[in-house]
Image (spheres, rainbow, N blue to C red):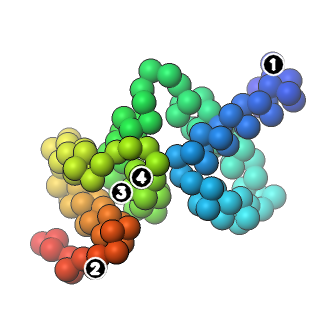
Amino acid sequence: MSDEDTPREASARFDAGMRVRREVLGDEYVDRALAMQTDFDAPFQRFITETAWEAVWARPDLDRRTRSLITIAILAALGRREQLAVHLRATHNTGATPDEVREALLHVAVYAGAPAANTAMALAKEVFDAEAGQVSEGDDRP
């Protein structure tokens, strides 16, 4: 909460961010994250909900599908597997298709490097295969 915010304004930002967070990531994921919250990380959870979810994801100029693809590409480029998996699973809520994810990861290969994209591509196959009830045929990374 900034110095200018009233408690009501801070609460409204948090509530709006929580709505978007639940819509994108799903109630089950958010409920698990909140259940694991402690006094230590509660300020971080509030910050991320107000900043990432309310101040960025709720902005009107990009749709959720586009934001999802951007987020996936950035997480892939940074090698953030855990959060990448979360956002890959969230594509069924954002409308991003596996074909669009593949295209985003091809961009990652060119602009952030083939190793980052290769790791992300393997993870995307795992996530999408699991959602489809399929078993991936091993890891074809060199």
Residue occupying image coordinates x 81% and y 58%: 39
- Callouts 3 and 4 close, C-beta under 8 Å: no
Give the residue at mark 3: 79
Which quarter of the rendered picture does the C terminus lie within?
bottom left
Amino acid type, mark 2 = Val
- Pointers 1 and 3 in contact (C-beta within 8 Å): no
Q: Which residue does the numbered mark 1 point to in the structure image?
A: 4
Q: Is residue 51 left or right of residue 71?
A: right
Q: Amino acid at mark 4?
A: His
| Residue at the extreme front | 132
The residues bearing labels 1 and 3 have C-alpha atoms spaced at a distance of 37 Å
> Label 1 sits on what residue type?
Glu
How many residues crowd mark 3 within 10 Å: few (<14), some (14–19), many (20+)?
Answer: some
Counting residues from the start of the chain, the first of labels 1 and 3 encountered is 1
Mark 2, residue position: 135
Q: Position of residue 9 (x, y in %)?
A: 80, 25
Q: Position of residue 38 (x, y in %)?
A: 77, 62
Q: Residues within 10 Å of mark 4 (few under 14, many from 20)?
A: some
Q: Considering depth in this image, is 68 or 139 the residue closer to the camera?
A: 68
Left or right: 77 as drawn, with respect to 52: left
Residue 72 is tagged as: none
Which sits earlier in the primary sequence, circle 2 or circle 4?
4
Identify the secondary structure beneath mark 4. helix
Q: Quadrant of the N terminus?
A: top right
User: What residue is pinned by disc 4?
Assistant: 92
In this view of the protein, can residue 69 be seen by the observer?
A: yes
Would you say 26 lies left or right of 115 here?
right
Is residue 113 in view from this perspective? no
Q: Position of residue 91 (x, y in %)?
A: 40, 50
